[in-house]
Image (cartoon, helix red, strand yellow):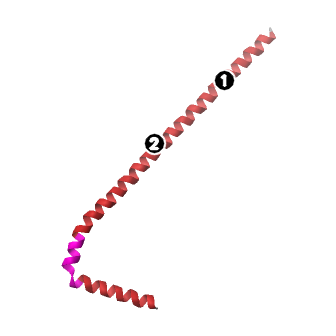
Amino acid sequence: MPNIIVGLLALSMGLWGMAVWWYSVEEFLRGAVPLLLILFGLVALMAGVSRVKRFDDSAIRREQQLDDIDLMQRSSAREETNDSSKIEGEDR
């Protein structure tokens, strides 16, 4: 119950303050809104850049993994051909 009373008092005092000092509130908003827009824009830009960077890093990792798999397949294919040629040489 005390929380409700304090909340209503704060709300009523805030509304009264905005009504009495509306010019000051308006002046504050004129200065604060552009600053907030700049701040939100920078945060959004950083989030976008980090997402693109993360995407590029994951693409590079995938490409490296595919290269590693390709190298392993090539080396195993070479070993199989070497083994089969050794077996053929022993048969002769």
Q: Residue at x 21, y 85 (%)?
A: 20
Q: Tag 1, which secondary structure? A: helix
Magenta stretch mostly in which secondary structure? helix
Residue 5 drawn in magenta:
no
Q: Position of residue 82 (x, y in %)?
A: 70, 18
Q: Circle 2 sits on which residue?
A: 56
Residue reaching furthest left? 23
10, 65: nearer the viewer: 10
What kind of element bears circle 2? helix
Q: Is residue 65 above or below residue 90?
A: below
The reply, left or right, for residue 89 in relation to residue 32 is right
Three-letter code for the amino acid on which mark 1 is drawn: Ala
Crowding at mark 1 (Cα within 10 Å: few <14, some 14-19, many 20+):
few
Number of the front mark, 1 or 2: 2
Residue 41 image-quadrant placement: bottom left
Q: Is residue 68 left or right of residue 25?
A: right
Asked whether 4 or 80 is in front, the reply is: 4
In reply to whether residue 27 is colored magenta, the answer given is yes
In the image, what residue type sits under mark 2?
Asp
Q: Is residue 62 above or below residue 9?
A: above
Image point 50% across, 43% down: which residue? 58
Tag 2 or tag 1, which sits nearer the N-term?
2
Up-down: is 88 above or below 33? above
What residue do we see at 39% from left, 49% from top?
Answer: 49
Q: Quadrant of the C terminus?
A: top right
Magenta residues (range): 19-29
Residue under pointer 1: 77
Give the farthest residue toward the top: 92
Q: Is residue 59 left or right of residue 89?
A: left
| Residue 23 x %, y % | 18, 78
Residue displayed at 63% across by 28% down? 73
Please, is residue 34 above or below residue 66 in the view? below
